[in-house]
Structures are given as C-alpha cells and as structure tokens.
Image (cartoon, rainbow, N blue to C red):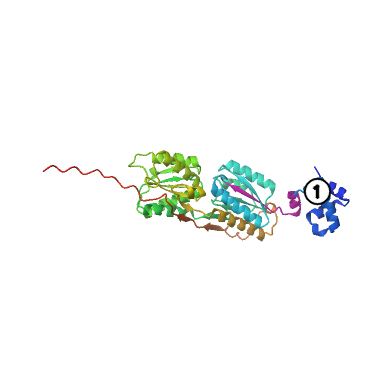
Amino acid sequence: MTRIQDVAQLAQVSTATASRALSRPQQVAAETRERVLEAARQLGYQPNVLARSLRQGETRTLGLIVADILNPFHALLAKGVQDTAERHGYSAFLFNSDEDPQKERRALETLRGQQPQGVLIVPTSGAGRNLQTLPGLPVVELDRVSGQPNPTVTVDNLDGAMAATRHLTGLGHTRIGMVVGQQDITTATERHTGFRQALRAAGVPYDPALVRPGHHREDDGYRAALDLLSLPAAERPTALFVGNNEMTVGAVLAARELGLRIPEDLSIVGFDDSRWAQTMWPPLTVVSQPAYELGVLACDHLVGLLTRRGGVPSASLPLPATGPPAPAPARLQLPTQLIVRRSTAPPPATILPAPPAADPA
C-alpha cells in the first residue's frame, strides 16, 4: 500500500510538505503542489480521510440507524438525513437494524469504533438499553421514542390515527378493525390509542375482537387481515385501519384473496403514503407522514447540537459533572395529513329479509 512517505520521495519533498499539499494545498507553493499531486496520481495514493480527521479532532461523520430500509417510509427518511448531512458538510454512515434489537446493538458498537460526531436512530424496542452504550455522544431519535433522555423528532401519531378513525365513523362504520404494530414501539401504541379515543368520541364501542397485532411487515398485515376478514359476515369488520404502509399492502392482498371489493365490501385506511397507494386501484385513503422532512429536521437539529458543542468529537467528551440540571431535550413533532381517496365508502347496506307475502283475500 502506498504511503505518504512514498509520495514525498517521488516528489522530492519532505513528508510534512507532501501532507500539506494534499490536505491544505493553499499553504504550499503551486509548483510544489503540482509535483506532489502528480506523484500521488502516479502511485495511486489515497489519503486516509478518517485518520486525518481523527488527528484534527473532527470526523465530520454521523451515524444513521433505521429500522427497515425496505420500508419506503424509512428510505425517504434516510434520504432526508443524508441530503441534510451533505448540505452541512457531513457524511452519514447508514445501518439497518431490521427491527432487531441485537442488530441495533451491533450497529451502535460498530459506529462507536468509527467515532462519529453524533447518531440519528429510529429506535427498536431494545433501544432504551442499547443507547446506554454511547455516553457523551449526541443522539437524536426519529419517528419513535426509546425512553432515553434524547431529543426526539416524531409525527403526531395520535392525531393521525384519530383522523383516520373519525373518517370511518363519519362514513357510518361501526365495526372497524385495526391491524396494529408492535405494542412495545411508541408509534404503534400511539396509533392504537388514537383509534380507541376516536371510537369513544364517536360513541362506537371498542371491540378487542376486531384488533390484531402485527410486526410492521407485509406478511403480518396479510395474516392479521385474513383472520379478521374470515369472521362470519355478521361479525366481520366493514372497515380496516392498518398501522403502517407495509402491513396495508398485506391487508389489501388478503381482502382480494377473499373476494372482497374495496370499498364496496370493505373500506381501508393505511398509515403512511407511498407511490403504490396512489397508483393502486382504487387509490388508497391514507394518513400521510412527512418522512423526508422528518429526516431533514432531525439532522438539522443534531448538527445544531454539534455546533453548540464547538464541533469537537463528541464521543471523547466527558460526562457532565454535578451542577445545574441540563435543559430538557427537545421534543419536535410534525403534523400528519389525512388524504381521502377511493378506498373508503359508507358500509354495505344491510339486506333485510323480504316481508312475508300477504294472505290472499
């Protein structure tokens, strides 16, 4: 492997001059700089940017851990983070926890070795423990809340779920099923709570027999919806509220497999918008989340924290000594929007038995 000393020897300069020519070219005479650059090209020399950053006391890197990179919501959120990091002059290392607390822990351990200046994370159910391995490192949580005293950037899940449920009760539905996410993740519990509160406000009894758990994946939505929609007709829900976009795909597939028409036989509202929700037939009524903006705001907030700390590598900062309590971490929340399309309609009309024929006179 080519070393900086090899470049210096070929360019006939000192090692220090060769290093300056590559890292701080404005401090080196133009002729010398060109000799060093030409030598580096000939030898195929690639400087170790991370090592140089560590020597200078600033890596200009951030860590980003998402829960499911195959989910369009998380992909869009990650793009918001990475675009914003680049705008601020940072690079972002991306990790996918796959909703697995053990993978999340390993990602955090890897990141700690890379010495990023801060971490953005969509927490798994085990993040409350895992994040304790990063004392002194600024962390901003996105979409979900771990319970650790970190700044958070989320959406108003409660209001979004209430809006979806109000829409269905407003259409006249009283047997409304819900496919919920993991109940140890805050987004799922908040959406479930919003569903229940909206039912109560509409005077519709909450029926736990019409609620099925899932784990945020398409297969979970399919199995949960298939179970609900296979109930006898008198017990089957006339509408479904599904807790995220991946499970909504599964719910739609289950309804079609059972021969149920949307929305004539079954109304569906999903939480999250996506291209497929807009282009499927009928287009899906959804609670839309500003996923890209969520990533932008979270990254802006983390960079702001780093700027206030002077831009030093945060992993090396000591824990604060005793003194006045630190201000409460920021809790930033973005609104959701209910987008009504063609997948919701009033419930099917009840077919009453024909009256008995009149006795002949």
Q: Report x, y in % for residue 101.
A: 57, 43
Q: Quadrant of residue 85?
A: bottom right
Q: Residue at x 59, y 41 (%)?
A: 102
Q: Residue at x 26, y 45 (%)?
A: 352
Does residue 211 lie above or below 296 as drawn? above
Q: Quadrant of the C terminus?
A: top left
Query: Horizontally, is 45 left or right of 102 in the view?
Result: right
Residue 57 forms part of the magenta stretch: yes
Provide the residue span drawn in magenta.
Answer: 49-66
Q: Quadrant of the N terminus?
A: top right
Helix, strand or loop under label 1: helix
Q: Which amino acid, mark 1?
A: Arg
Q: Residue furthest right?
A: 12
Residue 58 forms part of the magenta stretch: yes
Q: Which residue is mark 1?
A: 41
Q: Report x, y in % for residue 243.
A: 47, 47
